[in-house]
Amino acid sequence: MTALLSLLMSAVLFGCSLYPDVNRDPAKNNQATFRQDAVDCARAYPESGSGTHIKQRIGCMNLKGWR
């Protein structure tokens, strides 16, 4: 049980580290722009049961210049 919990926590932390958080444009590299772009991507790709919305949101953020 402990090994499963440890594996799950590792997967969650690894998944969160893949989400883009730095914008290529220094003028847009701030918390307010990040929040607005993240909300826009979340609205464009609503939560799905299979989890594919995460990859779609990451792709959306990449298109907005976040890496």
Image (spheres, rainbow, N blue to C red):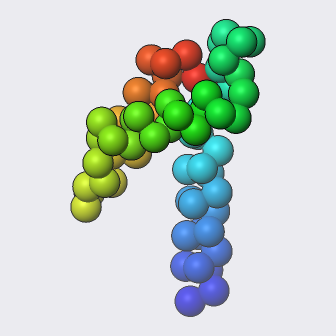
State the residue at coordinates (55%, 79%): 4
| Picture layout, residue 4 above or below residue 25 | below
Q: Relative to residue 16, is residue 45 drawn left or right? A: left
Q: In which quadrant is the N terminus drawn? A: bottom right
Residue found farthest to the left: 49
Residue found farthest to the bottom: 1
**Which of 13/5 is in front?**
13
- In x, y percent, where is residue 39? 46, 40
Q: Where is residue 25, by image quadrant?
A: top right
Can residue 1 be seen by looking at this rendering?
yes
Number of labels in the image equals 0
- In x, y percent, where is residue 7? 59, 69
Q: Where is residue 45, by image quadrant?
A: top left
Q: In which quadrant is the C terminus drawn? A: top right
State the residue at coordinates (26%, 55%): 48
State the residue at coordinates (64%, 44%): 17
Q: Relative to residue 11, is residue 54 drawn left or right? A: left
- In x, y percent, where is residue 21? 65, 33
State the residue at coordinates (62%, 68%): 9
Q: Relative to residue 24, is residue 26 drawn left or right? A: right
Can residue 57 be seen by looking at this rendering?
no
**Which of 34/5 is in front?**
34
| Picture layout, residue 15 above or below residue 62 | below
| Picture layout, residue 38 above or below residue 30 | below
